[in-house]
């Protein structure tokens, strides 16, 4: 590694410079300040970063609102019930979302700054790396260590005409002043799946388009189950295709795709791109200073969160690591402790949960079946459809399944995925099982409360050795 910290005697009073005032940046700054260090926290744009401003908070608030609309109609699952709900005032709904964002941004970010005397918040424009520090506007800040946590942003896919049609992204979609009648979503990953279903439940005609299939990173059985749920709700899915052109016309926006060798045209009011993100690293001087990044601008970091330049660390969406807010905060905390406390913590995502807030929710942890085989394990799997889980039967909602992956030789659990209405909360039980090295036998012998989705994990573990359909309630 190249060492840029030859001028440690000229620190400008700071022990650490943190670039970016989102979840990762605040985590790093607070960690260092709690250890008695002086920190320059350099922000640019809205304080709080992606999650609170344009990501997790606003999207999940709107997803919950859509669930309320859908839930009224879903009452018909129960004999003797009916219900109906609709969007009466889109503008008021959007304003309530914005109010929530503003409240949390103030409470969880801006109001925290005075609580840490060791942190100086500097918002004077974008920062640029220099030897031994950074420049921000007309100022030069120096410190022996720097953490880059400038996040990422949505990017448009390469499609002829897409830059000319005013395509929406995950941010601008939730800023629309009127509720559209129809939308085309490009990209069926986490963000696309969540937002497409949300808008469909708001009464919008939605077409979801993807090169491969829904949730390409999920297990095939899980992806298929979610696709079936989407189609049942009236979402049009176009998958296994390539993009041709997109044009704006009198009818709105028309996207042409090539599917099975034939052109297919789809027209809607707007096109929403949820097909990828890019790290915010342009203009920072990475090349000049020697910090390595990949083709998407994502900074390459080691297990200690250090970049290719000694003394410069990175964390969060700006890196080539997991793109989740909790992992951003976790990685930033490790980076700060390693940078200014001389510790040697290593990034560990072996038991990292992930969640897609669709309905049914999709959640996973550890290795999928293909990943486990690629890693050299002699793999065994079990699948329990939700119609074998008493909770789902009582709720009249058996959409989904639970899949577990284990090492045949040791019986140790390697991973698992859940698609279920309460999958986001259920996954943490499997996280703990993996974290502490449980076997399928041990999980199957664990006592679970009856009529919970988590009980399905016990049934899935027992499925390795028996047919749980032949068990009476609680007999396992």
Image (cartoon, rainbow, N blue to C red):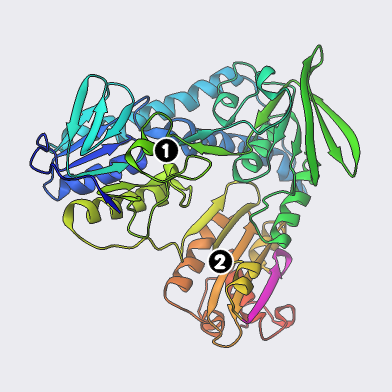
| Left or right of 407 on screen, residue 52 | left
- Number of numbered callouts drawn: 2
- Residue at the spot 63% in from the left edge and 36% down from the top edge: 274
Any magenta on residue 35?
no
The quadrant of the rendering that contains the C terminus is bottom right
Q: Quadrant of the N terminus?
A: bottom left
**Image coords of residue 447 (percent x, y):** 51, 78
Tell me which corner region of the image, top left, top right, bottom left or bottom right, holds residue 378. bottom right
Relative side of 438 to 43, left or right: right
User: Residue 247 placed where, x, y %?
Assistant: 77, 20
Q: Residue at x 65, y 23 (%)?
A: 167
Q: Position of residue 90 (x, y in %)?
A: 61, 21
Residue furthest right in the image? 262
Is residue 379 highlighted in magenta?
Answer: yes
SS of the residue under disc 2: loop
- Per the rendered image, the range of residues in magenta is 378-388
Look at mark 2 in the image and give the residue it sits on: 454
Separation of residues labelled 2 and 1 (CA atoms)? 34 Å
In the image, residue 436 above or below residue 263:
below
Comes first in the chain, label 2 or label 1: 1
- Residue 234, visible in the rendered structure: no
Toward the viewer: 217 or 129? 129
Task: Sort mark 1 into few (<14), some (14-19) or many (20+) by Cα contacts within 10 Å.
Answer: many
**Foreground pick, 71 / 443:** 443
Q: Which residue is mark 1?
A: 151
Task: Specify the label residue 19 is tagged with.
Answer: none
Relative to 228, is 58 above or below? above
Q: Main secondary structure of the magenta part?
A: strand
**Callout 2: few (<14), some (14-19), or many (20+) C-alpha neighbours within 10 Å?**
many
């Amino acid at each position: 590694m190249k060492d840029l910290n030859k001028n440690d005697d000229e620190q400008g009073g700071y022990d650490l410079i943190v670039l970016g005032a989102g979840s990762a940046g605040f985590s790093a700054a607070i960690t260092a300040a709690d250890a008695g260090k002086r920190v320059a926290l350099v922000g640019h744009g809205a304080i709080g970063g992606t999650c609170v401003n344009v990501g997790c908070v606003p999207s999940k608030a709107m997803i919950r609102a859509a669930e309320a609309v859908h839930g009224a109609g879903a009452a018909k699952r129960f004999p003797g019930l009916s219900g109906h709900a609709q969007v009466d005032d889109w503008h008021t709904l959007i304003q309530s979302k914005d109010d929530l964002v503003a409240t949390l941004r103030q409470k969880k970010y801006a109001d925290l700054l005075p609580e840490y005397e060791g942190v100086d918040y500097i918002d004077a424009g974008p920062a640029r790396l220099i030897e031994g520090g950074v420049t921000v506007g007309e100022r030069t800040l120096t410190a022996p260590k720097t953490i880059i946590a400038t996040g990422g942003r949505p990017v448009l896919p390469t499609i002829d005409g897409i830059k000319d049609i005013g395509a929406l992204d995950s941010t601008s979609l939730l800023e629309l002043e009127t509720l559209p009648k129809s939308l085309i979503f490009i990209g069926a990953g986490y963000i696309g799946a969540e937002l497409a279903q949300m808008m469909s439940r708001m009464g919008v005609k939605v077409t979801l388009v993807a090169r491969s299939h829904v949730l390409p990173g999920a297990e095939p059985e899980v992806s298929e189950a979610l696709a079936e749920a989407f189609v049942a709700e009236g979402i049009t899915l176009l998958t296994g295709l390539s993009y041709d052109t997109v044009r704006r016309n009198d009818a709105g926006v028309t996207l042409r795709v090539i599917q099975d060798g034939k052109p297919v045209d789809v027209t809607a009011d707007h096109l929403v791109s949820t097909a990828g993100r890019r790290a915010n690293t342009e203009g920072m001087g990475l090349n000049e200073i020697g910090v390595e990044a990949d083709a998407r601008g994502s900074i390459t970091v080691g297990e200690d969160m250090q970049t290719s330049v000694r003394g410069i660390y990175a964390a969060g969406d700006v890196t080539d690591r997991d793109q989740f807010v909790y992992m951003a905060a976790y990685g930033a905390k490790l980076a700060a402790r390693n940078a200014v406390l001389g510790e040697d913590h290593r990034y560990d995502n072996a038991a990292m949960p992930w969640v897609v807030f669709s309905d049914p929710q999709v959640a996973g942890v550890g290795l999928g079946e293909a990943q486990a085989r690629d890693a050299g394990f002699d793999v065994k799997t079990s699948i329990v459809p939700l119609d074998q889980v008493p909770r789902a039967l009582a709720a009249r909602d058996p959409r989904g399944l639970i899949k577990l992956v284990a090492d045949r030789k040791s019986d140790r659990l390697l991973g698992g995925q859940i698609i279920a209405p309460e999958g986001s909360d259920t996954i943490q039980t499997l996280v703990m099982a993996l974290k502490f090295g449980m076997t399928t036998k041990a999980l199957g012998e664990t006592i679970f409360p009856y009529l919970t989705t988590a009980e399905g994990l016990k049934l899935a573990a027992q499925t390795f050795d028996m047919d749980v359909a032949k068990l009476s309630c609680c007999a396992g």
